[in-house]
Structures are given as C-alpha cells and as structure tokens.
Image: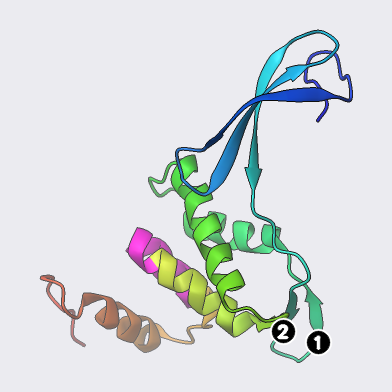
Amino acid sequence: MKCPICNYYDSKVTDSRVAADGLSIRRRRECLKCSFRFSTYEEMEILDLSVVKRDGHKESYNRDKIIKGLRRALEKRSITEDNFKKIISLIERDLQAIRKNEITTEQIGQIVMKHLKKLDQVAYIRFASVYQSFEDAQTFQRELNKLLVGKKLIKINK
C-alpha cells in the first residue's frame, strides 16, 4: 500500500478491526519511510464470476455496473454512503452464496431488487421499471400494488 503523503511503496499494519458496517476490515497503517499514519478498508471482491446476458453471451462480473444502476435508482434519495456501500456488500454476498461460476442478469436483477425493496421503495420502483422494461402505466401500477399489499396504505385502483 502506497503512502498518500510520500508515495513510498510500503507500510506496516498497526491495527486491524472489523469496520462499522460489519462487511469490511479497517486497517490502520504506518508508512515505513515518513511514519505517516493512515487507514485503509479491505472489502470482499468477486472473482471468476461470469454473467450470462439476456441474449446468451457471457461477460465477466463488473461491480461498477451494479453501482451505476443503484446510483441511478437512488438518485436524490436520502441514503448515506455507508448504507450504499452496505447494500453493495449485501448484494455481492448473495451473489457469492449462489456458489456458481455463472449467473444470469435476471438473477442479479432479482437480488438487487430484493435489497432495494427493503431499503427504499421509490428506488425499487425506479430500478424495477428499467430492469423489467415496464411498457405502460398498468405494468407500473401492478408493481406499485404489489408493494402496497400488506401495508397500511391506500391502494390506487384504476
């Protein structure tokens, strides 16, 4: 790990702890050249996972695509950066729990929607409308009604 002050290529770990989110490791480091102290975070990384697209072609898993979709769905919603990182970690944990080398975009989308539904229902509807390609207002309404079932909210009927 390079020092952020002098760019020296080596540092020593002085302390390691589970981060507040419970999903990463916080390491306190000290530069071996200038003795500057800084913190780094270690997170899980998904390797060797192929994503099978709707048209059948495969590509390597790309975390940035999930991040981009979530950022778009959560735009102008009140979510902290810590909660954003936590949802990414929970999604990736679920992806790894499948224990396969290949996963479909449909499976990824379902996992993302499951977590968004718990976190923010507006973001869930935004994501679902794009992911499931809502064609008309009735499709949108059906998805809203599913959200409202079991809630003490008034169902909007046509």
Task: Write down the quadrant of residue 8 in the picture.
Answer: top right
| Circles 2 and 1: CB atoms closer than 8 Å | yes
Residue beneath the point at 53% across and 83% down: 133
How crowded is the residue under tag 1: few (<14 C-alpha within 10 Å), some, or many (20+)? Answer: few
Asked if the stretch drawn in magenta spans residue 111, the answer is no
Residue beneath the point at 73% across and 17% down: 30
Q: Please, is residue 146 above or below residue 80 in the view?
A: below
Residue 56 seen anywhere in this rendered image of the structure: yes
How many angstroms separate mark 2 from mark 1 (CA)? 6 Å
Disc 2 marks which residue? 53
Residue 77 coordinates in the image, percent (x, y): 40, 49
Task: Write down the quadrant of residue 3 in the picture.
Answer: top right
Q: Nearer the viewer, residue 66 or 78?
A: 66
Residue beneath the point at 81% across and 30% down: 1
- Identify the amino acid type marked 2: Lys
Residue 70 coordinates in the image, percent (x, y): 54, 59
Residue 120 seen anywhere in this rendered image of the structure: no
Residue 40 coordinates in the image, percent (x, y): 66, 31
Q: Nearer the viewer, residue 59 or 141?
A: 59
Q: Please, is residue 1 above or below residue 79 in the view?
A: above
Q: Nearer the viewer, residue 23 or 106?
A: 23
Horizontal side of residue 8 vs 51, given as left or right: right
SS label for mark 2: loop
Q: In the current view of this chain or complex, which residue is farthest to the top?
A: 34
User: If the image is split into quadrants, where does the C terminus sit?
Assistant: bottom left
Task: Write down the quadrant of residue 34 in the picture.
Answer: top right
Q: Please, is residue 142 above or below residue 91 in the view?
A: below
Horizontal side of residue 105 vs 131, given as left or right: right
- Identify the amino acid type marked 1: His
SS label for mark 1: loop
- The span picked out in magenta is 117-129
Check residue 57 in the rendering and tell me which mark sits there, or answer none.
1
